[in-house]
Image (tube, helix red, strand yellow):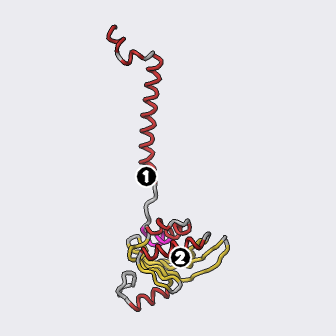
Amino acid sequence: MEANRHSPVAEFPPTSRVLFRSAHRCALALATTAILASFLLASCAPAKPTDPVSVVQAATDCLNEGDIDGYMGFLADDAVALVTGTRYEGSQAIRALLERDIALSGGVRSELANVRVDGNVVTSTVNIYEGGALVATYDNYVDVVVDGKIIFDGSEGDLVVECSSDPSQAFCPGD
């Protein structure tokens, strides 16, 4: 009996020992739940799309949210974009364009319509809305997707011109 009186556990009244054990069990249960929840949430996160139409839609969604970093995740490092007759080559040039345009555009949203896919080429009509009103429509807009990344972004006419001038470009159809 004398030894028990000097042990650290014996110093706590019986009620305190029960509360200590309960608090300890609750802390362990919370930690375990947090760990399990993090695994479950990570496994529920949607996988990055790889099919061409889903890649283009996801990239468009990122731009609509003003998420340039998210969009860049869908863009190849050596991508080419043609915008109003100007050629932007490489992801950094395209990023600079987007940062400038998104800062200037405030509230502009793109919507894809009449989406068609032929292999890795996605052709669509792009409707541009500002403040909920349709302000522009671009027919036959083309994105070429390889390995889940956009490598060309421009009009169908831009693609034809690009591939006529240099058919060796990665986004040009082979013979």
In the image, what residue occupies the spot 43% across and 17% down? Answer: 12
Provide the residue designation for mark 2: 115
Q: Is residue 119 visible?
A: no
Provide the residue designation for mark 1: 42
How dense is the environment of label 2, judged by Cα within 10 Å: few (below 14), some, or many (20 and up)?
Answer: some
Where's the C terminus, which quadrant? bottom left
In the image, what residue occupies the spot 45% across and 81% down? Answer: 88
**Magenta portion: prevailing SS class:** helix
Task: Compute the Cα span from label 2 to label 1.
Answer: 31 Å
The residue segment tinted magenta is 50-56
Q: Nearer the viewer, residue 139 or 84?
A: 84
**Secondary element type, mark 2:** strand
In the image, what residue occupies the spot 40% across and 91% down? Answer: 165
Report whether 43 appears left or right of 84.
left
- The single residue placed furthest to the left in the displayed view is 3
Task: Name the quadrant containing residue 148.
Answer: bottom left
Residue 111 in picture, x, y percent from top left: 58, 73
Where's the N terminus, which quadrant? top left
Quick check: is 88 in the magenta stretch?
A: no
| Residue type for callout 1 | Ala
| Residue type for callout 2 | Val
In the image, what residue occupies the spot 45% across and 89% down? Answer: 160
Q: Is residue 163 visible?
A: yes
Quick check: is 53 in the magenta stretch?
A: yes
How dense is the environment of label 1, judged by Cα within 10 Å: few (below 14), some, or many (20 and up)?
Answer: few
**Secondary element type, mark 1:** helix
Q: Earlier in the sequence, mark 2 or mark 1?
A: 1
